[in-house]
Image (cartoon, helix red, strand yellow):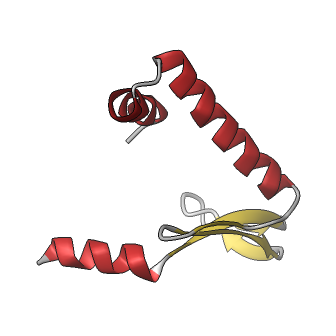
């Protein structure tokens, strides 16, 4: 599913114009981005939690050349699914 698909779903299910639907999605994503920049988590009840995690520098290997390289420290976003969403997905597997 893409951002355009999300906009289309809001348009169809709520009846807002596509422009208004796009503005809602943009505001949502901008708010999430700003929250991540500030180093905070985003928890969406019934869906899951997006966390910012600091990774330390480490040694890695270029798979093409086999050369060892230093991987710089960085922040990454991780996602942990909620128990509710997990159970809904499991029911669909049966």
Q: Residue at x 47, y 18 (%)?
A: 17
Q: Is residue 88 left or right of residue 29?
A: left
Q: Residue at x 38, y 28 (%)?
A: 8
Q: Is residue 34 left or right of residue 46?
A: right
Q: Residue at x 81, y 48 (%)?
A: 34
The answer to whether any part of residue 67 appears in the image is no
Is the residue 41 above or below the residue 18 in the image?
below
**Residue 51 point in image, percent of width and height:** 69, 70
**Residue 7 point in image, percent of width and height:** 45, 30
Q: Residue at x 44, y 82 (%)?
A: 83
Q: Quadrant of residue 42?
A: bottom right
Is the residue 83 above or below the residue 1 in the image?
below
The quarter of the picture where the N terminus appears is top left
**Residue 14 point in image, percent of width and height:** 40, 33
The answer to whether any part of residue 91 appears in the image is yes
**Residue 92 point in image, percent of width and height:** 18, 71
Q: Quadrant of residue 73?
A: bottom right
């Amino acid at each position: 599913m893409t951002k355009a698909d999300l906009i289309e779903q809001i348009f169809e299910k709520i009846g807002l114009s596509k422009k208004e639907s796009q503005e809602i999605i943009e505001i949502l994503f901008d708010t999430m981005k700003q929250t991540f920049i500030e180093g905070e988590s985003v928890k969406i009840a019934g869906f899951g939690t997006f966390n910012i995690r600091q990774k330390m520098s480490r040694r890695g290997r270029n798979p093409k050349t086999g050369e060892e390289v230093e991987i710089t420290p960085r922040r990454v976003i991780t996602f942990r699914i909620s128990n509710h969403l997990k159970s809904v997905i499991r029911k669909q597997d049966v």
